[in-house]
Image (spheres, rainbow, N blue to C red):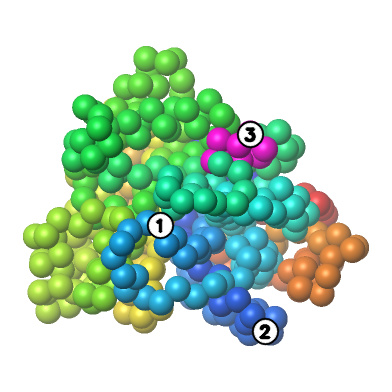
């Protein structure tokens, strides 16, 4: 199999190459089907010129147990992540990594529906807090359920903020243990990890180094870690980033928000963060990837995501020391299939392989091997 033929879950699992993803949030719950299509098409049209391997579609939860602090933005329920992901995949020809919170009493039913739609890569997210009562499986139980399924592959989140000495002390431990959690999840079947948004390089560097060391001790090949970055242009978004649990040094917040153009300063700062991580972790043996997202609907921050994506991708590819270039290719949308007994909402996301929907997509050539950042399908029913 060539790199151009790899599915998204194979690219995420492949330690020999980086992966580049772009995040999106589904429309609000109850949005009319035609409006959902318009929203998905707008996202695809705006992101088409980015050389992305695929999209991340988040599963947004209220998370009342996360913190006692007031949520900066009011919570709004959104449509199912797998449904929105199917729309994006059918419009773009790019596969999606579908997030799913395990605190769902209908988790196994969701998993079967997700598979029927045609998604093969999901990212499991645990409960917001260990306190309180939650329905659905625990993260360990959910991993066991997914691992037993055929043609479905999963990754998990990793949170560098848990891997600080302060966090360890709060939990009554002498040293942080997020790297131990990651190895435990690898043994349970996790093929990759997606980080929380990074605004402080030090905890991420510590985590990657400890993770690499433990993997060597256990004779385990490290699963890829995709580092997430989200630009900020205003105080309200910065407050929300911190509410989500992201560690933002005080001096960093002041540097960005006091700048004449905060979004540009944020992008510049995050590029420096990636350079520091790559420099400090060079040679440790952990394969890396990049994901970019906007945590708001503010236009300058959405535009900033695209610029940040291009710059971070350049930095990561340049760090490999291998020549690369960008080229475009024509692709067919993934051949997802909705079952005959699907309801009308499900039929909305079904894809008819006879419809030759073509889009422009960018690819990357690394050395003499083509790394297609679209899914090139030559036949019917690849995901059926």
Give the residue furthest to the front. Answer: 132
State the image coordinates of residue 165 (x, y, percent, origin top left). 19, 36
Magenta residues: mostly which secondary structure?
helix
Q: Is residue 144 magenta?
A: yes
Crowding near pointer 3: few (<14 within 10 Å), some, many (20+)?
some
Q: Cα distance, mark 3 to mark 1? A: 25 Å
* Residue 281 in view (yes/no): no
Instruction: Name the residue rendered at 40%, 35% in the picture.
Output: 287
* Nearer to us: label 2 or label 1: 1
Q: Quadrant of residue 190?
A: top right
Q: Quadrant of residue 230?
A: bottom left
Mark 2 highlights which residue? 32
Mark 3 or mark 1, which has the lower sequence index? 1
Instruction: Name the residue rendered at 44%, 15% in the picture.
Output: 219
Q: Relative to 263, say whether 313 is above or below.
A: above
The region drawn magenta spans 139-146
State the image coordinates of residue 108 (x, y, percent, origin top left). 71, 48
Q: Relative to 34, say whether 302 is above or below.
A: above
Q: Secondary structure at mark 1?
A: loop
């Amino acid at each position: 199999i060539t790199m151009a033929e790899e599915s998204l879950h194979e690219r995420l699992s492949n330690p020999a190459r980086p992966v580049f993803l772009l995040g999106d949030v589904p429309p609000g719950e109850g949005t009319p089907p035609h409006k959902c299509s318009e929203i998905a098409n707008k996202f695809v049209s705006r992101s088409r010129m980015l050389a992305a391997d695929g999209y991340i579609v988040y599963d947004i939860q209220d998370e009342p147990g996360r913190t006692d602090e007031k949520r900066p933005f009011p919570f709004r329920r959104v449509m199912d992540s797998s449904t929105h992901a199917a729309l994006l995949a059918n419009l773009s020809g790019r596969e999606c990594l579908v997030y799913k919170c395990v605190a769902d009493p209908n988790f196994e039913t969701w998993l079967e529906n997700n598979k029927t739609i045609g998604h093969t890569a999901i990212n499991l997210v645990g409960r917001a807090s260990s306190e309180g009562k939650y329905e659905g499986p625990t993260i360990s139980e959910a991993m066991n359920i997914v691992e037993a399924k055929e043609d479905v592959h999963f990754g998990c989140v990793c949170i560098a903020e848990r891997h600080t000495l302060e966090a360890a002390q709060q939990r009554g431990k002498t040293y942080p243990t997020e790297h131990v959690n990651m190895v435990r999840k690898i043994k349970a079947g996790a093929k990759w990890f997606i980080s929380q948004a990074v605004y402080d390089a030090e905890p991420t560097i510590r985590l990657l180094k400890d993770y690499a060391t433990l993997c060597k001790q256990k004779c385990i090949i490290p699963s890829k870690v995709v580092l997430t970055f989200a630009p900020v242009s205003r105080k309200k978004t910065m407050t929300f980033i911190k509410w989500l649990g992201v560690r933002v040094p005080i001096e960093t917040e002041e540097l960005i928000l006091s700048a004449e153009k905060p979004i540009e300063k944020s992008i510049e700062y995050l590029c420096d963060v990636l350079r520091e991580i790559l420099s400090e972790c060079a040679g440790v043996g952990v394969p890396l990837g990049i994901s970019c997202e906007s945590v708001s609907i503010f236009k300058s921050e959405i535009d900033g995501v695209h610029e940040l994506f291009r710059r971070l991708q350049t930095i990561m590819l340049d760090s490999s020391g291998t020549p690369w270039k960008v080229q475009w290719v024509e692709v067919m949308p993934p051949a997802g299939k909705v079952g005959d007994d699907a309801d009308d909402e499900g039929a909305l996301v079904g894809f008819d392989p006879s419809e030759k929907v073509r889009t422009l997509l960018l690819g990357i050539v690394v050395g003499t091997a083509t790394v297609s950042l679209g899914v090139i399908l030559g036949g019917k029913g690849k995901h059926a």
